[in-house]
Amino acid sequence: MKLDQKIDEIFSNARQNIEAHAIPGAALGIITRDGERAIRVAGHAQIEPEKIKLTSSMWFDLASLTKVIFTTQRCLELVDAGKIELDVPLFHHLPDLRQYDLNAVERHLTVRKLLAHETPLPAVEPLYTLGQDAETLRAYVLQRDWPKGAAVYSDINFILLGLLIERVTGVALNDQKLPTGLSFIPPIAQSVATESCTWRGRVMRGEVHDENAFALGGAAGHAGLFGTIDGVLDHALRLLNGVGLSSSLMAEMMTPQFNSRTLGWEINHDGWHGGEGHSPQTIGHLGFTGTGLWIDHDRGYAWTLLTNRVHPSRHRDTGIMALRRETGRRVADLFKAQ
């Protein structure tokens, strides 16, 4: 398949959104298991305070793609290495977690439950408004008696996993070794702008958009990772070819755990954000800034759509969900036709 001859039609919908000023810019990448890839880029990396054209070498704030590209991956690598276990209570690895209440629910959660968002912890809490330094805020996260409720998709789950990774590896997230094209500290001049933040008083560029990740030191288990489009595609290619994880853990990562969630990822289901027409063994994830990655393991392809839809503000309708679904449907049609 010559992807480079097919990708323009798939990307045309994103171009129309850019021309309609719904989103500033977009990058689409498609890759196959044998390594063939095609990339298209259009629009601007920044429109305020000055316009900067988007190029394929620029770094996107991946937002919640951090959860799967970094945190899920690193947790499973640590399981493979025998450093942590999926089904052992967290207090075995974080003995100071809720240390004043040894029967606390948080102490008895497992890595599996956190990865699958199968916990009673809340979706999010504005930790950044507490005004604490990063280390004190990390201590607060460990000691917080979190409100409990029905299981939801939760940033708190992955903030705890980020703290677990730091504790087990002895390396801060900002200093974790990452593959080429992925970084917690991108070059600012080559970064894509996100929001004009009222709290920080500036357009965020090369600094994490997520307020809680920023307050926690710039990197956290739920957000903080940046990537080029090639860096994101390279990660997808490693997963397509089973590189970096044992076959048993790869299979575990693809197995539904709770509702539509696998370990970290969301699996193909009716009405999902990845569009129609992909195989049942397709996984994906979104990032709040306007990013997304989807991987069809059965048919051997992956695609990523990276946008800066929150620039200059999140408080507007960009049509991003419809764009994602239509782009995904066109990708599926391409591979179904083969």
Image (spheres, helix red, strand yellow):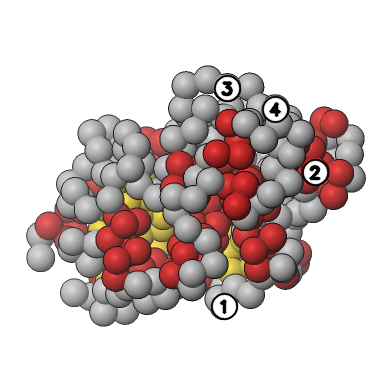
> Camera-side residue: 99 or 243?
99
Q: Nearer the viewer, mark 1 or mark 4?
A: 4
**Callout 4 amino acid:** Asp
Kindly identify which residue carries mark 4: 145
Kindly identify which residue carries mark 2: 139
**Callout 1 amino acid:** Thr
Kindly identify which residue carries mark 3: 148
Kindly identify which residue carries mark 1: 180
Which tag, 4 or 2, sits closer to the chain's start? Answer: 2
Instruction: Identify the element where label 1 is drawn.
Output: loop
Q: Is residue 122 above or below residue 299?
A: above
In the displayed structure, does residue 67 sit left or right of residue 15? right
Give the farthest residue toward the front: 102
| Mark 4 and mark 2: Cα distance apart in space | 12 Å
Quadrant of the rendered image containing residue 197:
top right
Would residue 302 be visible to someone looking at this image? no
**Callout 2 amino acid:** Ala
**Callout 3 amino acid:** Lys
> Camera-side residue: 84 or 324?
84
How many badges with numbers are in the image? 4
Q: Kindly identify the residue that appears in the image at 18 percent across and 63 percent down.
A: 299
| Mark 1 and mark 4: Cα distance apart in space | 38 Å
Q: Nearer the viewer, mark 3 or mark 1?
A: 3
Which tag, 3 or 1, sits closer to the chain's start? Answer: 3
| Mark 3 and mark 2: Cα distance apart in space | 19 Å
> Camera-side residue: 257 or 20?
257
Q: Nearer the viewer, mark 2 or mark 1?
A: 2
Which tag, 2 or 1, sits closer to the chain's start? Answer: 2
